[in-house]
Image: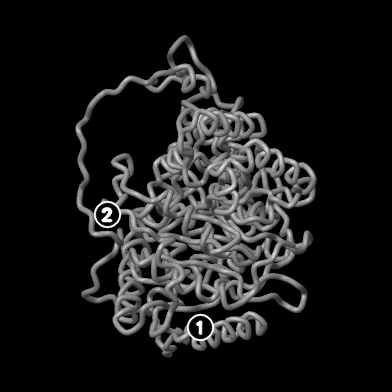
Amino acid sequence: MTDIHRLTALQIAGLVRSGKRSAQDVARAFLSRVRSLDGDIRAFVTVTEPAALAQAKAVDEKAARGETLGRLAGVPVAVKDNMCIAGIRTTCSSKILENFTANYDATVIQKLRAADAVFIGKTNLDEFAMGSSTENSAFFTTRNPWNLECIPGGSSGGSAAAVAARMASLALGSDTGGSIRQPAALCGVVGMKPTYGLVSRFGLVAFASSLDQIGPFAGNVADAAALLEVISGHDPRDSTSVNRPIPNFLEGLSKGIKGLRVGLPKEYFIDGMDPEVETSVRDAVKVLQSLGAEVRDVSLPHTDAGISVYYVLAPSEASSNLARFDGARYGHRSSRAQNLLEQYEFSRDEGFGPEVKRRIMLGAYALSAGYYDAYYLKAQKVRTLIKRDFDRVFESVDVVVTPTSPTPAFRAGEKADDPLQMYLSDVFTIPCNLAGLPGISLPCGFSSKGLPIGLQILGRAFEEDTVLRAAAAYESATSWVKVP
Amino acid sequence: MSLTDKDVNHVARLARLALTDEEREKYRGQLARILDYIRHLEKYDTKDVPPTSHVVPLSNVWREDEARPWADPESILANAPEREGNFFKVKKVIE
């Protein structure tokens, strides 16, 4: 059975749990795909082959002892390289952490270990998750498995590409302004940003703490739901993690969407968006309607403020979070430094790439004396207006449906010299983070050039179950789940 | 808007970045362009609108301040750019 990668994660777990397939077989099959495909795609910063094989062996030994295996037994999972796995490098695709080895497991990693999943490698990202294409990685640009000339999206581009090419069955990403959903859309996979507070961020290298969330990548909605269930839950080590019972996302997936109220916000269908994207999304809405959903036009009037708010708040938080990279206890230290100030300034200038420098300077500016009220406080107030837009709309609809990205994948280099143009590619994903809501992207078509198009579904806080149910209903009525 | 070299030097110092002349020139233009874009926030009326710093209504979350043993200090020290025994070695902090 050479085609094990074509099975869903839940099917793979089923085979391993029932003893029909060893975890080691599964791991070897996926590692062999990594070897044959990743030379071109370059999704992985580190392939953890020995650790993966040892982990798979331990799962098989557990089975041999007659112990019950976890829900994701033997499923190969790729992890964005900004989450810590003990004993493995965690680089954030930055020179400043190029030689940093994590000495503890992130909470999501502990939970996946407990579910008997197998970590296959660490995936490439825009440095410190700042970007929309992986071109800001200090190491290399990941390529889109559907067209190697194109970028996979970002910042979790490596995780999206790894799942799209089925070099991993599942992957973890982090989403601050769309960094899971946008690459999921561009690579033709499912990606979900959970409600702020649902998943612990302990062990995730912080970028913008009021926005960051960890979430799943998968080849289909049920797999994404299963992974989300495994990583969810309260964690005393993350003070923003919310203490509520973990829902059973899988149970309600197939209940259908008869009577579900779907909002179509007019501000998400704008001039300049790709006409093929618009057509695919409007067709998807018709599918939802044919499944019994009631579609209504709604308005989120402050949508166009999202990018400005985001590019004040996220860099401000980043400038504070990234202050810890000082060349003292870990990370790069400049050999030119003669005193402590030079140790900070030279190490950071040598260690950070251009986008990270831009953002921490932007943040330092927005927070600095004389500008705080005009930028930071103003942005926090407009954030309230954006959140209120959603609160109001969710009084009359259950989910909001939009395109995930205004365009399909663009060519590598196309926007690399124009930071502002790159920022605008996040226009449809950012408001969801600002409001702290759950959002999913799933495949809803292909462009005439054969590039995937993504549909975004947003829901009320902690109503992942409704979002997933709508996504599953759409997915089962269509056939866009494909492997390049 | 335009930024002066002095402005860029000021934020670079706040961000603890030693920029080269070439970098300073590049970021001066890019930051000014981004700030211009961001200024359209001014058009939104936020009179009587409270700021949102955080979307989840959690107040302070406390835990006991307890020392816990770390099984493997070497795994932490191994990441040190420079060390002396079980200490991180840094440049002189107090002149």
Q: Nearer the viewer, residue B72 or B12?
A: B72
Q: Secondary structure at mark 1?
A: helix
A359 over A380 or under it: above or below = above
The picture places residue A411, in percent across and down from the top left corner, at 74, 65
Circle nearer the N terminus (1, 2): 2
| Disc 1 crowd, CA 10 A, few/some/many (<14, 14-19, 20+) | many
Q: Secondary structure at mark 2?
A: loop
Asked if residue A346 shows in the view, the reply is no
Q: Which mark is residue A124?
A: none
Q: Chain of mark 2?
A: A
Asked if residue A116 shows in the view, the reply is yes
Q: Which mark is residue A288?
A: 1
A392 over A96 or under it: above or below = below
B2 over B79 or under it: above or below = below
Task: Give me the residue at 19% from left, 32% from top.
Answer: B64
Specify the quadrant of the image occupied by residue A246. bottom left
Specify the quadrant of the image occupied by residue A16. top right
Kindly report the distance in space between the C-alpha atoms of the residues bearing marks 1 and 2. Answer: 30 Å
Identified by mark 1, the residue type is: Leu
| Disc 2 crowd, CA 10 A, few/some/many (<14, 14-19, 20+) | few
The picture places residue A77, in percent across and down from the top left corner, at 58, 45
Task: Give me the residue at 57% from left, 39% from top.
Answer: A118
Labels 1 and 2 in the same subunit: yes
- The quadrant of the rendering that contains the C terminus of chain A is bottom right
Q: Chain of mark 1?
A: A
- Per the image, the residue denoted by label 2 is A244
Task: Give me the residue at 64% from left, 42% from top.
Answer: A21
The picture places residue A69, in percent across and down from the top left corner, at 48, 39
